[in-house]
Image (cartoon, rainbow, N blue to C red):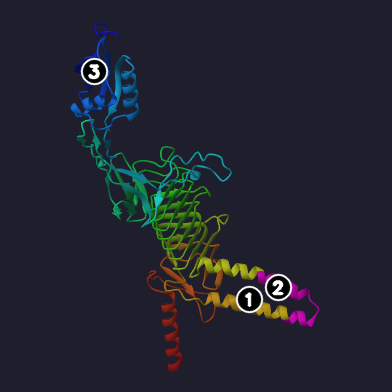
Amino acid sequence: MSGTSHLSVTGNEIRKLGYNLYIRISPDQMKCHCSYIPTDKGSMMTRGEFETYLRQYNVYEGIDLTALERFAISAAAGKQLVDVLVASGTLPIHGADERMEIKARADDADLKNEDGTVNMYRVQTFINVNKDDEIGIVFPAEEGTPGRNILGRSIPPVPGKPMRVKIGRNVRRVDGGRLIASITGRFVQTPFEISVEDEYIVHGNVNFRVGIIDFKGVVDVRGEIRDHFDVKATKGVKVFGNIGACNINTDGNVTFCGMDGRNKGCIIAGGNIYANYLHDVTIECAGDVVVAVEIHNCSIKALGKVVVDKGAIMGGICIALGGIESKTIGSKSSSTPTILNAGNSYFDLNEINGIMAEMEKVQWLYDCSVLLSERTKLKEEIEALSDRIVAIRNKEYPNRNAKINVKHMMHENTQITIGASTEVVKEKISAGTSVIENSLKGGFRYLPFTNLFVRATDIERSIMSELEQLNSAG
């Protein structure tokens, strides 16, 4: 048996006749290493003695029974053992930090065209959410699981930390952790806060820096919207500057300086449109179109009124259920036709045009038919289609005003339709004139100017009442 002079072993030394045992406990009391040095005289250590020595030094937890068994067998066989790990404590499991999982996602398909190519004008995606959508969930911080050292003492875990991200505007936390959008809008996430915003402010122009906008809320552009950069906003669009040849689509109002659509630009609005000028633009508007200076060569369909305060409506077509008013209407040039239609819904006109096309087909079949039974059936179809047109024309609209107001002048060759009557103006109409339909003789009445708050039906009713009084007196 060898001695210990050439070995470097440390720990609590137990000297016995036949061997020396060293029990080394780590400073953090998480590990126990043992060394065994047999000597020339005396008996070897037994397993029972080894376990007694471990208990003597309070080593109770985490004993590796396999390692202990092997150590005892080797020691009994007189083998020298150095720094053998026989017990290990259990480390605590620290608590997980509070964390947030976001479920709201942008649709990457929005970055591509229908053919799968990349849309160069769309440089960002918007995470749009609806009111009461679940946008994420917060998992609370955990306390963790305690550990134990080899002396049997508990080691407390480090609890999880609260997250740094703040739950911001228009997001509510329910059922402990679910995050719900309080409004319809755009989900916004920064390193320190999440929120849902119903207004998107562009501090500058909408161009390649911003890209195409698709936003559930109000878009407020402090600059201009450049060509090809479409904007879709559910609650309205406000533009400090001008709009180029692009598409604007909203359920709300649109306010801007001017728009040169170059026969490519389009505005679809569920509210009103307010502008200084409109050039070569296609418009469908559920409310009013109010322009300060001029409308030039536009296609405008409005379920409200169309008003140009200081300038003219020149060229193009203008259909307005709520009436039309402008300082000047038409153009000196006969090559720029101006077509106005007041008091009709463009939806109804589209339906009537479809019925008329169908009626022409049925009429052609009627003219070609020689069988009496067939002609009778086709005639009934024509009458039914005619009745449908009459029913559409007789629809009631609270804001209908079949009236065109001229503040300064209406030029020749302007085509005007009011109600069911259509004429091409042969001579200039002078300033301060309101034009309404003549329900008695057909055609139009040219009357002194009254604003669009005075309805054509009320004017016509008053005229008819005066005529009845005159006839009664006569």
Q: Are the residues at dot 2 and dot 1 in contact (C-beta closer than 8 Å)?
A: yes
Q: Is residue 435 magenta?
A: no
Task: For the C terminus, give its image quadrant.
Answer: bottom left
User: Which circle's residue, 2 or 1, is located before the other in the chain?
Assistant: 2
Against 163, residue 381 (above or below) is: below
Which label was assigned to residue 385?
1
Q: For residue 470, which quarter of the picture?
A: bottom left
Q: Bin the neighbour count of mark 2 within 10 Å (Cα to Cα): few under 14, some 14-19, many 20 and up.
A: some
Which one is nearer the viewer's eye here, 101 or 2? 2
In the image, the segment drawn in magenta is: 358-376
> Could you tell whether 311 is left or right of 189 in the image?
right
Cα–Cα span, label 2 and label 1:
10 Å
Q: State the residue at coordinates (73%, 82%).
A: 376
Q: Amino acid at mark 2?
A: Val
Q: Bin the neighbour count of mark 1 within 10 Å (Cα to Cα): few under 14, some 14-19, many 20 and up.
A: some
Q: Are the residues at dot 1 and dot 3 in contact (C-beta closer than 8 Å)?
A: no
The residue singled out by tag 3 in the image is: 21
Cα–Cα span, label 3 and label 2:
115 Å
Against 9, residue 166 (above or below) is: below
Which one is nearer the viewer's eye here, 237 or 430? 237
Q: For residue 310, which quarter of the picture?
A: bottom left
User: Could you tell me residue 273's position as x and y percent?
Assistant: 41, 57
Q: Secondary structure at mark 2?
A: helix
The residue singled out by tag 2 in the image is: 362
